[in-house]
Image (cartoon, rainbow, N blue to C red):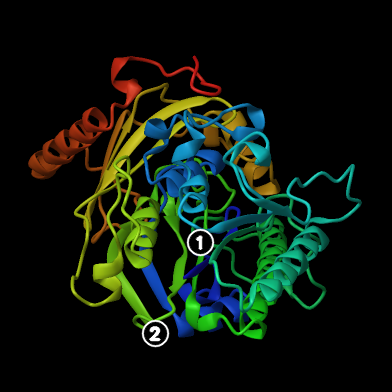
Amino acid sequence: MNIVYMHTHDTGRYIQPYGYAVPTPNLMRLAREGVVFRHAYCAGPTCSPSRAALLTGMAAHSAGMFGLAHLGAQLDDYSKHLVPFLGGNGYETALCGIQHEAPEAEMIGYDRILGNPDFDMSVFDFDSVSWDVYNAEAAAEYIRGRGGRGNPFFLSFGMFNTHLNFPKAAPSLETAYLMPPSLMHDNEANRRLWAEYLTSAEAADRCAGIVLQAIEDAGIADETLVIFTTDHGLPFPQMKCSLFDAGIGVSLIMRTPQRHRKGEAVDAMVSHLDLFPTICEMTGLAAPQWLQGCSLLPLLEGRAESVRPYAFAEINHHVEYEPMRCVRSDRYKYIRNYGETAYLTPNLDTSGYRSFLLDNGFLRTEKPQEMLFDLYLDPAERVNLAHNEAYRETMRELADVLEKWMRDTEDPLLNGAVPLRRGGTA
């Protein structure tokens, strides 16, 4: 079984298969041919920790990824990455486009690096759209060349879109008639910003379409697992780099060779940590002992309605240190802030919306040490129930679950502040 893993930056669930008016017809077609996980969550809503967790099957702190790879953060052990695992089990592995689990792509151990893996405008005089298209075409060429080969391949195709800075908005988008996400104030500046996001999302979708068409052209659709996801939520305050669902909620679409649950939506809660064990079970490979997730195959085959009672996520370093942990059940979310109560300005991606919030007192808003939300009654996570007597037992239970998970996964935060580690050293 071949595996094609397609991923974007900072998309959350803002694509057409999740009901949003976002021009992503190729991903919509993939959703109709596969299965959409409506309640998928990353393990850390910042770029490198999220990707490290997905590709090692471990919490970011277990993998040693406490910050951003381009700032020097590394995995403790790259042999636990999915790529060397599959490479040691007969797969040819190839990277095309973005990776964010290592300071340099060569550290991961891919057999082949295609296109241009480093978005460096000083080397490639391209905008982000042209860069992604360039890599999509390189990925497509590789896939077409793999048709009829005996040994399977794993291809990671990573797109820069939909990361800030977004491309210039398409002229066809009329900002007067757009609505930004509900968490954003509706004004002209944010509508223009949203038009730029829509343009960026359309570019990513176009590139996904190039790769999907290559799979068809090579005649290998019935022997290829396709996974599409993103690292975390939109690159705006209280989304990316936050443990609210707007930060940890991600799109996840899978099309299996068997067309499991074709055209269906799955409401079970799942985690990025579950993808590595799913691949193991689907390929018949023995799962390595370090995995912390659950295979999704019982959901795909309709043998189970759920595979996990809780999903966990964390923040350590983004640009600045902001240690937080959370546990989410189907109904409740508990967040523990281990750092300062104030929001950290460098951890909010630069944008016009960020400037608008800062100008209007965002940094004076409260960020409590503990937060509890009833997600059935308050899906937007606006009402903190941490000190509501009626929820005392629920909060105590979730706090205990979170602490047990931290101990079971040897979270160093239990012992105090966690320094930014590079290559497994403090």
Quadrant of the rendered structure where residue 115 is?
bottom right
| Residue appearing at x 54%, y 81% in the figure | 221
Quadrant of the rendered structure where residue 366 is?
top left
Label 1 – label 2 distance at C-alpha: 17 Å
How packed mark 2 is, by other alpha carbons closer than 10 Å (few <14, some 14-19, many 20 or more), is: some
- Image disc number at residue 229: 1
In this rendering, would 10 be left or right of 351?
left
Quadrant of the rendered structure where residue 389 is?
top left
In this rendering, would 5 be left or right of 72?
left
Name the element at disc 1. Answer: strand
**Residue 363 picture location, percent across and down:** 53, 31
The residue beneath circle 2 is: 262
Front residue of this view, candidates 270 and 323: 270
| Residue appearing at x 31%, y 51% in the figure | 287
Question: Mark 1 vs mark 2: which is more N-terminal?
Answer: 1
**Residue 402 picture location, percent across and down:** 22, 36
How packed mark 1 is, by other alpha carbons closer than 10 Å (few <14, some 14-19, many 20 or more), is: many
Front residue of this view, candidates 161 and 375: 161
Front residue of this view, candidates 395 and 390: 395
- Image disc number at residue 59: none
Q: What residue type is labelled 2?
A: Lys
| Residue appearing at x 88%, y 50% in the figure | 124
Q: Which amino acid does label 1 sit on?
A: Thr
Front residue of this view, candidates 239 and 400: 400
Name the element at disc 2. Answer: loop
